[in-house]
Image (tube, helix red, strand yellow):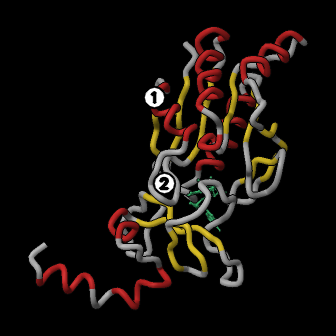
């Protein structure tokens, strides 16, 4: 039975690596797959992993219709047994509905990969719909870590290492950016996301708010 599976986690936890591995493993067993992504850091029509692999992929745009994509290929006699859908947080809710229909009515597996929440801890539209519709939601096992060593659960946007909470929801970017690159991202545990404490600002904050919290009995 075909499945819609959503593999999720913070930025930098290995989602694109897993997407490429799954594509490789299924293709190696003779299954036909199609790679889709949207706004990959490596540029349009690429699906890239920080482990170094970058492959051609179909770029999802506002006008992409996944039902039409699969039907068109099958009409030409090409196998479509599964879809790999990276950066799925950027897909529209309607496109995720199409993915569900591809699974149910065309019998193709859909393996979607993405972050659930943005830099303000709000769900992306594509991720929200995937959480609502997926047969399975898998949280990646390789844990990204906050600077404090705790499991990172949230994505922070930074400007010169300082967390910001205003701005457009979509700004393509990376973690561990050099300081001269103003906008970057950092994964944090919830506590440090709430306190807006990044690696850069942690030294300054360590002595004051936490000490005050304890004294207040919070
Ligand atoms: N130099 C490296 N050596 C080993 N592993 C690395 C290295 N650089 C990145 N990684 C691994 O790659 C992961 C990021 O993979 P990637 O697929 O790009 O993440 P995502 O798609 O979730 O943002 C990191 O969590 C880390 O485990
Ligand atoms: C938190 C957050 C992230 N983004 C962007 C930044 C990256 O280009 C991607 C995530 O890619 P990854 O492979 O999971 O590292 O999403 C964004 O546009 N808005 C945000 O709030």
Viewer-proximal residue among 98 and 199: 98
Position of the N terminus, as image quadrant, is: top right
Q: Quadrant of residue 109?
A: top right
User: 186 above or below 102?
Assistant: below
Quadrant of ligand 2: it is bottom right
Residue at the left extreme? 217
Residue 190 appears at what percent x and percent y?
36, 62
Position of the C terminus, as image quadrant, is: bottom left
**Side of 160 relative to 69 (left or right):** left
Q: Secondary structure at mark 2?
A: loop
Give the residue drawn at x 58%, y 16%: 2
User: 73 above or below 156?
Assistant: above
Q: Quadrant of residue 151?
A: bottom left
Mark 1–mark 2 Cα distance, whole angstroms, equals 24 Å
Which comes sooner in the sequence, label 1 or label 2?
1
Question: What is the number of the mark on residue 142?
Answer: 2
Viewer-proximal residue among 149 and 181: 181
Question: What is the number of the mark on residue 132?
Answer: 1
Residue at mark 2: C-beta within 8 A of ligand 1: yes
Give the residue drawn at x 90%, y 12%: 76
Give the residue drawn at x 45%, y 59%: 154
Neighbour tally class for label 1: few under 14, some 14-19, many 20 plus, Cα within 10 Å: few
**Is residue 210 something that shows in the picture?**
yes
């Amino acid at each position: 039975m075909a499945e819609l599976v959503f593999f999720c986690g913070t930025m930098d936890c290995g989602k694109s690596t897993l997407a490429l591995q799954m594509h490789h493993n299924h293709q190696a067993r003779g299954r036909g797959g199609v790679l889709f992504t949207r706004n990959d850091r490596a540029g349009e029509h690429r699906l890239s992993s920080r482990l170094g692999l970058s492959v051609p992929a179909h770029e999802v745009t506002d006008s992409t219709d996944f039902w039409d994509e699969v039907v068109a290929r099958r009409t030409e006699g090409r196998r479509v047994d599964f879809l790999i859908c990276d950066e799925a947080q950027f897909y529209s809710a309607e496109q995720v509905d199409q993915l569900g229909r591809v699974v149910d009515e065309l019998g193709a597996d859909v393996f979607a990969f993405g972050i659930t929440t943005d830099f303000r801890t709000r769900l992306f539209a594509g991720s929200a719909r995937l959480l609502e519709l997926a047969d399975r939601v898998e949280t990646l096992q390789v844990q990204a870590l906050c600077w404090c060593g705790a499991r990172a659960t949230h994505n922070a946007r930074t400007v010169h290492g300082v967390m910001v909470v205003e701005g457009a929801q979509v700004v393509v970017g990376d973690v561990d950016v050099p300081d001269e690159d103003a906008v970057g991202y950092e994964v944090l545990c919830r506590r440090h996301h709430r306190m807006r404490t990044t690696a850069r600002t942690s030294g300054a904050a360590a002595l004051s708010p936490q000490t005050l919290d304890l004294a207040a009995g919070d």
